[in-house]
Image: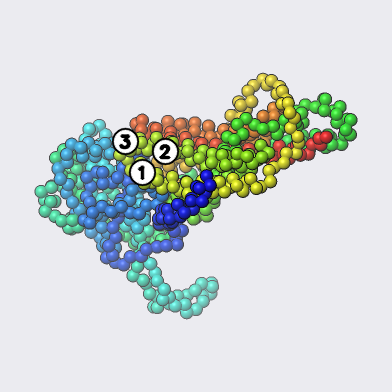
Amino acid sequence: MAFLERKMPGICSVFLLVALFAHCSRGFYLPGSYMHTYSTSDTIFAKVNSLTSIETELPFSYYSLPYCKPLGGIKKSAENLGELLMGDQIDNSPYRFRMNVNESLYLCTTSPLNEHEVKLLKQRTRDLYQVNMILDNLPVMRIAKQNGVNIQWTGFPVGYSPPNSNDDYIINHLKFKVLVHEYEGTGVQIIGTGEEGMDVISEADQKKASGFEIVGFEVVPCSVKYDPEVMTKLHMYDNISPVNCPSELDKSQIIKEQERISFTYEVEFVKSDIKWPSRWDAYLKMEGARVHWFSILNSLMVITFLAGIVFVIFLRTVRRDLTRYEELDKEAQAQMNEELSGWKLVVGDVFREPDFPKLLCVMIGDGVQITGMAAVTIVFAAFGFMSPASRGMLLTGMIILYLFLGTAAGYAAVRLWRTLKGTSEGWKSVSWSVACFFPGIVFVILTVLNFILWGSKSTGAIPISLYFILLSLWFCISVPLTLLGGLLGTRAEPIQYPVRTNQIPREIPARKYPSWLLVLGAGTLPFGTLFIELFFILSSIWLGRFYYVFGFLLIVLILLVIVCAEVSVVLTYMNLCVEDWRWWWKAFFASGSVALYVFLYSINYLVFDLQSLSGPVSAILYFGYSMIMAIAIMLSTGTIGFITSFYFVHYLFSSVKID
């Protein structure tokens, strides 16, 4: 152990410099703080991300299908930690754009399709796979009308299957529309002030810069049947005549063996009044704002109801009983003790050590770490520090925060351990367990899912190199900081109990119904504050929608913390009133049981809202990730409830006079 502590900084220093800076510093900027301007005829190449589908949730590389490849070969873009974990694989593409130059271009013609390529194209088409293209960091958007309403998607399909037909057709012609905003430079002269206090600008001296910003990227996908004999005579980027998307199937490009598919595209540049800082608004349009507000109002009603109960407990019951108890002399107190019932009778047992104290300390430590990570991430995102243009940055930030909050986890766990045991003995074991408990669960689940993804040859599989990076980050940052937190916990003063614990445990009266039934029922109240927002979060994860209403999420988080605290306090008081002094774990699971309802809601979402998900592999992936989310929520909410209940019980019994 001592050897590790001496060598760890030296072993990790070089790796940390490489891993942290290489994976976390790329591509991050605040919304509206960085832009790229282009001059007329400047060349811009689009990039392609992994193919994705809401039916399978298994991403695949764009070049796993027989698409045209760039002249200089395929080059992967630098990816951060979050992008790699999400299965993003961003590559260069042959799609070339020249600023403000409208053109129709030929790309390539494939060799005759073989049986494997046909099977793959048909499978990707029927699984509704989407091609995700990026230009100037903007995802391509497809807009279509359904029942007179404009529906927008990111990406475009690999192909389509007409109803009542066994044939499939590939998308091989793309009509791009690039929205550009002309950047107006300086050189503006102010010559006076108008009557309304507005500046009057001399138009004669106004100079416009020659720069253009890309503020929109839209596509209309088509399937067009070309004559391969004619098309093979062309070279990449040769001009062709503009194409109208055919509506007849016989003029569309069918997917079958020995077919040669020609790929073409058109580009149209359109001037737009959208300014660069607002270019993401089209992607982040917040649908259902009223639903979010309904969720918040619903949570406020629950909080008000619970706050009323807590108020009654404190002011009417607890304070009245304590005042009456303290005003009596010792002889009267002794006589009264014989007649007492309720929480005052467990004064000698309320701080008795719980079952599995080490496990409780470990779960509280990990709960502190997860809660801190979630709170800081959501606060930063709510204030606009997590740009949607920085793909994977949210997940990267969460991982880095989790690693560095190991100190808080170790401190909380060891200090609680000292409070329960009255000694620091065994603190290293507790600290190591804290460092390994939640990451170990996640590691086991991800490893199982990864073998499944490897078997499916999906880009969502975590590479071995990334496994090494994650394990090294955990071992070099989280473990030492957790041990440091544990060491600080041994030096902190343990929390002193206000009453002594009897040597012989008091018998707990029999109850008409199991106490755990009440604990499980208590989780419905925190879930009531969370479930509407949970729907939007699940939709963003599994349906590929952008989630960017972090302001609402921050409010919901604050309300959730309050509800968890109130529920746990009320349930703890109810247990003490029936002379049940085993409140420790019940306080944890009173609020932590919300995770059970989150997991059940995930199953409900899969059955009723994610009906397109198909295949056992996709279902296993869904349940695996849902399990990780539910465990994290249990540790976080359980910790909030336990800490609140602990200080409530401490306050309650510190007011009781005991000889």
SS for dot 2: helix
Q: Find residue 446 and name its label.
A: 2
The residue carrying mark 3 is: 455
Q: Hey, what amino acid is under mark 3?
A: Gly
Q: Compare residues 20 and 40 and report the one nearer the observer.
A: 20
- Residue 605 shown left or right of residue 488 in the figure: left
SS for dot 3: helix
Place of residue 383 in the rendered image (x, y in percent of width and height, measured from the top left): 52, 55
Disc 1/disc 3 C-alpha distance (Å): 14 Å
Q: Hey, what amino acid is under mark 2?
A: Leu
Q: Compare residues 14 and 230 and report the one nearer the observer.
A: 14
| Residue 596 visible | yes
The residue carrying mark 1 is: 464
Q: Find residue 255 and name its label.
A: none
| Residue 375 visible | no
Disc 3/disc 2 C-alpha distance (Å): 14 Å
* Quadrant into which the C terminus falls: top right
Residue 171 picture quarter: top left
The numbered mark, 1 or 3, whose residue comes first in the sequence reads 3
Residue drawn at x 29%, y 60% is 44
Q: Is residue 519 above or below residue 464?
A: above
Tell me the crowding category of disc 3: few under 14, some 14 to 19, or many 20 or more residues within 10 angstroms, Cα based.
few
Tell me the crowding category of disc 2: few under 14, some 14 to 19, or many 20 or more residues within 10 angstroms, Cα based.
some
The numbered mark, 3 or 2, whose residue comes first in the sequence reads 2
Place of residue 386 in the rendered image (x, y in percent of width and height, measured from the top left): 47, 53
